[in-house]
Image (cartoon, rainbow, N blue to C red):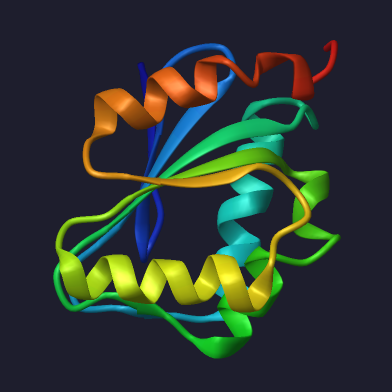
Amino acid sequence: MRTIELEVCTLTFIDEDIVHAHFKDGHTVSQEEVHTMFEAIAIERKGRKALLVVSVGVGSTLSNEARTYASSEESSRYIAADAIVVRDFGHQLTANVFVRHNKPQRPIQLFGDMDSAVAWLGGHRGLVGQP
């Protein structure tokens, strides 16, 4: 597995299509930082879309602008589907608001564990496209 350390997150390339983005503890992630993350994924994948597993450390959140950008049409150029791993009930509520309010135009699902998230994303490989 290849790993890239960014200021606010660690990107782990689990396999040829699935990328795990773990936002580090104690950060309020900006729109620019989400864009930087997407660009790092695009460079590593040579422009191919990814299937993204997202986990968030304690005390971390995305700013309103970052959530809006993460669900935008532009972000769908980078990401084919999202699986969000929720760590507790409070985080689940926040993730539900993101899904229902921001309404990303791609498949998105919440999970209680990483294995389920990765398995679900595995069923969406057809959305990635050819290299």
Q: The C terminus lies in which quarter of the figure?
A: top right
* Closer to the camera in the image, 9 or 55: 55
Q: Quadrant of residue 117?
A: top left
Residue at 26% from the left image edge and 32% from the top image edge: 114
128 above or below 63? above
Residue 6 position, x and y percent, is 41, 55
Residue 50 position, x and y percent, is 64, 31
Q: Quadrant of residue 62?
A: bottom left
Say whether residue 62 is left or right of residue 5: right
Q: Quadrant of residue 91?
A: bottom left
Residue at 66% from the left image edge and 16% from the top image edge: 125
18 above or below 9? above
Say whether residue 1 is left or right of residue 70: left
Q: Is residue 31 visible?
A: no
How many tags in the picture? 0
Say whether residue 72 is left or right of residue 110: right
Q: Is residue 114 visible?
A: yes
Residue 68 position, x and y percent, is 67, 78
Residue 34 position, x and y percent, is 57, 65
110 above or below 50? below
* Closer to the camera in the image, 110 or 25: 110
Residue at 68% from the left image edge and 26% from the top image edge: 45
Going by the picture, which residue comes out furthest to the bottom?
A: 64
* Closer to the camera in the image, 81 or 13: 81
Say whether residue 131 is left or right of residue 32: right
131 above or below 127? above
Q: The N terminus lies in which quarter of the figure?
A: top left
